Image (tube, helix red, strand yellow):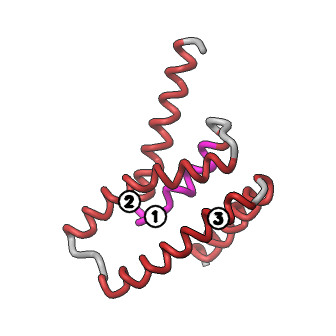
Amino acid sequence: MIKSEKTVKILKYIGIGLAAGAANGLFGSGGGTIAVPAMVFLLEEEEHRAHATALLIILPLTLVSSCFYLANHFVDWNLTWKAMAGGAAGGIIGAFLLNKCPSDLLRKVFGIFMIIAAFRMIF
């Protein structure tokens, strides 16, 4: 790989991280909706690897954003504990299903989810 190609790839990594971090901080989530397509289309990563990597990218973003939200007393702890329990169970189920799901189906399901979420937010 030529030095300029390597620089471009590093800039893509940083750009994806910045965009995912900004979305996570601004919307409280959403880093994966940016990171996954960016890794697939800009970095040409395999679909499964992009989804798994997005989770690890989102973890530090979420911790940083959470500190801000906690410091400003934006957290409803009664809701948080219940959602965390469901989220942990859902994470286990989702990780299991990711291993079973073919890439083309995974891409379609993710795309449909994005369209439904966008539709619900607009209307």
**Label 2 packing within 10 angstroms: few (<14), some (14-19), many (20+):** some
Q: Which mark is residue 29?
A: 1
Look at mark 2 in the image and give the residue it sits on: 62
Residue in the image at 41% along x and 56% along y: 59
Q: Gap between marks 2 and 1, in whole Å?
A: 8 Å
Residue in the image at 44% along x and 80% along y: 83
The numbered mark, 3 or 1, whose residue comes first in the sequence reads 1
Q: Secondary structure at mark 1?
A: loop
Left or right of 78, for residue 32: right
Residue in the image at 54% along x and 48% along y: 53
Tag in front: 3 or 2? 3
Query: Residue 48 in the image: x percent, y percent?
Result: 67, 50
Is the C terminus in the top left, top right, bottom left or bottom right quadrant?
bottom right
Q: Secondary structure at mark 3?
A: helix
Mark 2 touches mark 1? (CB < 8 Å): yes
Tag in front: 3 or 1? 3
Query: Residue 36 in the image: x percent, y percent?
Result: 60, 50
Q: Gap between marks 3 and 2, in whole Å?
A: 22 Å
The numbered mark, 2 or 1, whose residue comes first in the sequence reads 1
Report the predominant secondary structure element of the magenta stretch.
helix
Q: Gap between marks 3 and 1, in whole Å?
A: 22 Å
Which segment did they paint magenta?
A: 25-39
Look at mark 3 in the image and give the residue it sits on: 96
Amino acid on which the number 3 mark rests in the picture: Phe
Residue 116, image quadrant? bottom right
Give the vertical position of 37 relative to 108 (above or below): above
Query: Residue 49 in the image: x percent, y percent?
Result: 63, 46
Amino acid on which the number 2 mark rests in the picture: Thr
Give the vertical position of 80 relative to 118 (above or below): below
Left or right of 87, for residue 41: right
**Label 1 packing within 10 angstroms: few (<14), some (14-19), many (20+):** some
